Image (cartoon, rainbow, N blue to C red):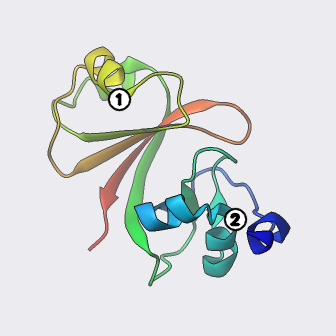
Amino acid sequence: QGEEENACACYSDPLDYLYEPNASILKAGAFKIIANTYGLGKLHPNSHLYTSGTLVSGFPGRIFKVCGIHPAKASFCKDLDKANLAVRNFPCKTEELKRKLKIKDGGELYIFATTLANGKHVIIRCRKTA
C-alpha cells in the first residue's frame, strides 16, 4: 500500500488507446502503480481508465482503440442502435444513460462515459483490440 501512496500518476486526455484494468487490479487499489508500470496516462483520479498514444502490450485488462471523443450529449449517437456501454466516474448510472442515448446492449462498439481530469464529462467511442 505504501508503494501506491508514493506512486505518481500523470493525467491525460484520451489518446489513441484506452485501458480498463482487470477487477483484481481494481480490488488491489493499484491505480497509480499500474499507470507507472505500463507508462499510461490516467483520465481522472477516480475514473480508473488509462490511455496511451501507442499500443502497450501485456496490460492486465481490456484494451480498446479510441474511435472518437464526444461531449456527453445524446446527439452524438443518433446513428447507433447497439453498443456496449460502461460508466466510470460519471454523474448517471449505466441503465439511465442507455435510456437517454436510446441504445441497446451488444455489437462491436464500446462506449465509455467518464469524467476527465479537467472535470469535463465525455463519451469515448472505442473498439476492442485483438
Amino acid bearing label 1:
Thr
Whichever of callouts 2 and 1 sits on the residue coming sooner in the sequence is 2
Q: Residues within 10 Å of mark 2 (few under 14, many from 20)?
A: many
Secondary structure of residue under mark 1: helix
Residue drawn at (34%, 18%) of the image: 96
Extreme residue in the right direction: 6
**Residue 78: mark in rendering:** none
Alpha carbon of mark 2 to alpha carbon of mark 1: how far? Answer: 25 Å
- Count numbered badges in the picture: 2
- Residue 16's x, y, as percent? 50, 62
Residue drawn at (30%, 57%) of the image: 127
Amino acid bearing label 2:
Lys
User: In the rendered image of this protein, does residue 107 appear above or below residue 72?
Assistant: below
Residue drawn at (19%, 52%) of the image: 108
- Residue 42's x, y, as percent? 65, 57
User: In the rendered image of this protein, does residue 57 appear above or below residue 86?
Assistant: below
Q: Is residue 24 left or right of residue 10?
A: left
Residue drawn at (35%, 22%) of the image: 97
- Residue 71's x, y, as percent? 52, 28
Q: Residues within 10 Å of mark 1 (few under 14, many from 20)?
A: some
Q: Is residue 13 left or right of residue 118?
A: left
Q: Which residue is mark 1?
A: 94
Extreme residue in the top direction: 100
Q: Which residue is mark 2?
A: 32
